[in-house]
Amino acid sequence: MKFTILSLLLPFTSSLSAPTRTLYTYSESARIFTEAKELMPGGVSSPVRAFKSVGGSPIVFDRVKGSKAYDVDGNTYIDYVGTWGPAIIGHADDKVLEEVKKTMDKGTSFGAPCVLENELAKMVIDAVPSVEMVRFTNSGTEACMGMLRLCRAYTSREKIVKFEGCYHGHADSFLVQAGSGVATLGLPDSPGVPASSTKSTLCATYNDVGSVEELLKEGDVAALILEPVVGNSGFIKPTKEFLQGCRDLCDKYGTLLVFDEVMTGFRVAYGGAQAYFGVTPDVTTMGKVIGGGMPVGAYGGRRDIMDLVAPAGPMYQAGTLSGNPLAMTAGIETLKVLKQPGQHDKLEAASKKLVDGILAHAKANGHAATGGYAGGMFGFFFCEGPVTCFADAAKADMEKFGRWHAGMLERGIYLAPSSYEAGFMSLAHTDEDIEKTLEIAGEVMAMI
Ligand SMILES: Cc1ncc(COP(=O)(O)O)c(C=O)c1O
């Protein structure tokens, strides 16, 4: 049986008029996903991939290259998910693959020091203002877990403050009002997280310095942790005053300021959001781009703080595959490309062109919409702006987003399947890609 994503979106389809182009069908994706659901919870290895918040069934990819993704039904998409951020120079870059293949010939994992770790560490330290030393991990979640233990060890305090709608991986202490996947699935927070793990986690409101001071003023908070540009409640930009206010309050109350740059690192600027906004945290977490599509995370910061990490110091954190040569190679080669002058200007110009165009089509068709961008990261919401915090983002029209997503997908544009996710631009996206996307956006905005 052939069927389309729209046919699966039963409640949403009635308002859609007849398509003007041949729409994609997904029978092979549907077959594979049906089987996957028997084998893996929800059919996926990570929840948002399951398309739950937009309805329907996910697309099963066969391969990726440049700005494109190719599915198992033979459909080609212009991809603005970019494997959730890492593919910033484009998928499967020839040079990255060539170097990874050379490294692979020497072995996939050493579990021993490897010179490639030094090379990537130097690149990270050179680029990211707050980082004087770095510890590599295998994921952003691990990096955030390590960072949290480090901040507690350094300050001898337990409490942490995060922001409603910010996501810092799936460690117990962070699964409090955590945006993204948790919000997408409508889970208040995850069952299975012991109350004892979250009792020291307090939540403030993004872009609201007053809400931060309320929580820091007792002087007993180890760390203030934030996404310095939010990507896990949809795209929300901070004001420079908010970031500077967080810096000043942390200095006032002896709290460590942590920028979780797993998403924004090397994406909004080569030096991350801290370089983009000129506000320097004490500790930074990273992931995604620094692994060039391989599993990597990292945390780093001032030398006096990092000196606490074992074996230099007593704060224990470890990893069998951490710093493995394949991931280091993919990261190094990706950063070499990104470091060339003008790359982030190109990314930001492309993000701007796309968002401005989408908003213009929304307006022309009478939809309330607001959006923004920073470097190679962007997003928009179906609601009046401004959106400055999670509560604003939650007011967006999610059903309309579902119709938008399905309409774009069927015409070959792959967007993140949730209004609570950001979009990712790459250096491989061409003007033609963006113009084609906008032409299709115009058609879909007229239909939804
Ligand atoms: C800001 C932020 N922190 C942490 C994480 C967790 O990273 P990972 O999925 O690699 O565990 C993510 C993942 O999207 C993220 O966006």
Image (cartoon, rainbow, N blue to C red):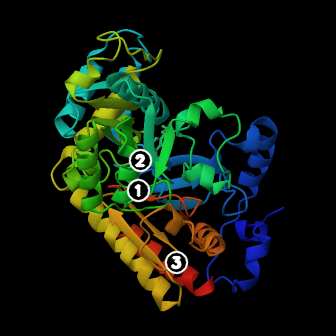
- Residue at 64 percent across and 38 percent down: it is 45
| Label 3 vs label 1, nearer the camera | 1
Which residue is label 1 attached to? Answer: 211
Nearest the eye: 307 or 155: 155
Label total for image: 3
- Residue at 71 percent across and 59 percent down: it is 26
Which residue is label 3 attached to? Answer: 383
| Label 3 vs label 2, nearer the camera | 2
Percent x, y for residue 198?
Answer: 57, 36
The disc labelled 1 sits on which kind of residue? Ser
Q: Mark 1 and mark 2 in contact (Cβ < 8 Å)?
A: yes
Q: Earlier in the sequence, mark 3 or mark 2?
A: 2
Q: CA distance from mark 2 to mark 1?
A: 7 Å
Give the vertical position of 9 relative to 141 (above or below).
Answer: below
- Left or right, 173 with respect to 335, comes to right
Q: Mark number for residue 215?
A: 2
Percent x, y for residue 354?
Answer: 38, 71
Nearest the eye: 367 or 429: 367
